[in-house]
Image: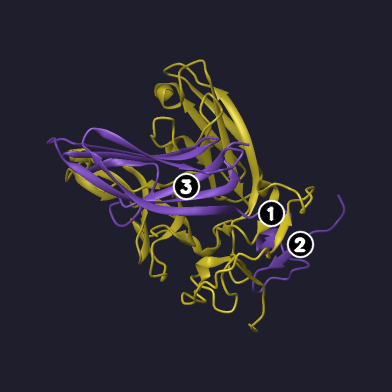
Chain colours: A yellow, B purple
Amino acid sequence: MADFGALVTLKGYDAENCPDRFLAFSSSFQNLKTFSRYSVSVTIPTAGNINTITINHNLGDFAPFFVVYNDTSNDKAYFMSGKNGYTLHNFIRQYANKLEIDVDGDYASWFGSAGQTAYFTVYLFLDDFATVSEEILSEAGSAGASGNDYGIRVSKDGFDVDNCTDDQLAFSSSFFTALVNQKGIDDAGGASTILHGLGYIPSALAYGQRDGDDFIKMAEGMPYYLNPIFGGRTGLFYSVSDESLFMGYNDLDMVEFSAYWRTDYTFYYLIFKQRADG
Amino acid sequence: MGDWGFRISEKGAEVLTGDDKEMAFTSKYALFKGSTSGTGQTTVSSGNTNTVTIAHGLDYIPKVRAYADVAYSGFAELPVYGRITVLEDYQCWCYADATNIYLKFYYLDGEGGGNHTFNYKYFLYKDKGKL
């Protein structure tokens, strides 16, 4: 492949020698593209009942997603958690052509109380999990700090680039983006470790599919302590270190009475250039 | 709306005929955009919840995402909760309203009297957390 392409740095960085993570855009890397955003709501049911929100997106593939809970007051934005901080991951299923959110009356207090309306914002991304291998162009380089008013802005369809709001922009060199370092699908037959080669702790999105299911669920942040015999949590988890992304479904071995990583899960992941640790 | 816009293909993809998924950028679909990020640490005394409050200066409710050093190996994305040891519980989560973003850190030492220091990083996005 010839040495050509397009590259835009964040403000203050030299395009000639900018570390990858300070790029706003590069044709060398994929970037999360927002397929659609949805505002949805449902009545919180009483105990023993479940109300389900269904979003038919017809993407035809498992697509990355996340859900924000806007509370019953519709004026807050909890990332993948209820108002009490407990995770919503297990209530959300992403199929090839639809996404479902369960509001379970047994967990009504996580959302509000039975009879109230629970509001959500859902982001779906156009991208899939087709394998993209790690590629690092530059981790060296320095900022050439400048306060000059220059850069690139591209508005969303139907908005005036000269005076639209930041949220109405499709791209701006003023804002960092979700540049993808690598992505893929891993059926490790147990917990999965994906080396990323970045040398720092990156941000990531991880999902899992149990054998036989036709949907994926988003993985939660992995707790410290995993032995369910002594209070460790079971579930679909991920964590990131400066070497790798680690994903697994932690469960209780009823024979050995210890934790083990289930072997019937396939993992879908995106590792970004963004640093999560500094 | 006419047939105009801006698209840049990924390496190896044809920009004129390639699928939207093969584009590194297309004005048809907005990139997910962040504006600021920050790091810090907070030390929580047993039985308490510390709240880190950061003004975002936007006139809408943005999306926020955060990580903390509370994982089995490395950093974990918030929300996350569980045990640090058999006798130590913790819970971390984040949210935004129209004024601030909030990072919440709870810690409980079952033996009493302890505290725990959480290191965190947050990302504030230009994209809305509530449409």
- Number of the label disc, if any, that sits on residue A180: none
Image point 50% across, 70% down: which residue? A133
Graded by Cα atoms within 10 Å as few (under 14), some (14 to 19) or many (20 or more), the crowding at tag 1 reads many
Residue B22, quarter of picture? bottom right
Eyeballing the image, is B10 above or below B129? below
Q: Amino acid at mark 3?
A: Arg
**SS for callout 3:** strand
Label annotation for residue B65: 3
Q: Classify the position of the N terminus of chain A by image quarter.
A: bottom right
Q: CA distance from mark 3 to mark 2?
A: 29 Å
Residue that appears at 44% across and 57% down: A203
Marks 1 and 2, how far apart at CA: 10 Å
Against B112, residue A73 (above or below) is above
The answer to which image quadrant residue A174 occupies is: bottom right
Q: Is residue B37 above or below residue A83?
A: below
Left or right: residue A66 compared with residue B3: left
Pointer 2 local density, CA inside 10 Å: few below 14, some 14–19, many at least 20? few
Q: Residue A6 in the image: x percent, y percent?
A: 67, 73
Q: Position of residue A124 (x, y in %)?
A: 60, 46
Coordinates of residue A240 in the picture (x, y in percent) = 37, 58
Left or right of A88: which side holds A227?
Answer: left
Chain for disc number 2: B
Could you say where residue A146 lies in the image, as x and y percent from the top left? Answer: 59, 68
The amino acid at mark 2 is: Phe
Q: Which residue is mark 2?
A: B6
**Residue at 48% from the left image edge and 70% from the top image edge:** A134
**Observer-nearest of A83 and B48:** B48
Q: Are marks 1 and 2 in contact (CB under 8 Å)?
A: yes
The amino acid at mark 1 is Ala
Chain letter of mark 1 equals A
Q: In the image, are marks 1 and 2 on the same chain? A: no
- In this figure, which residue is indicated by the disc labeled 1? A170
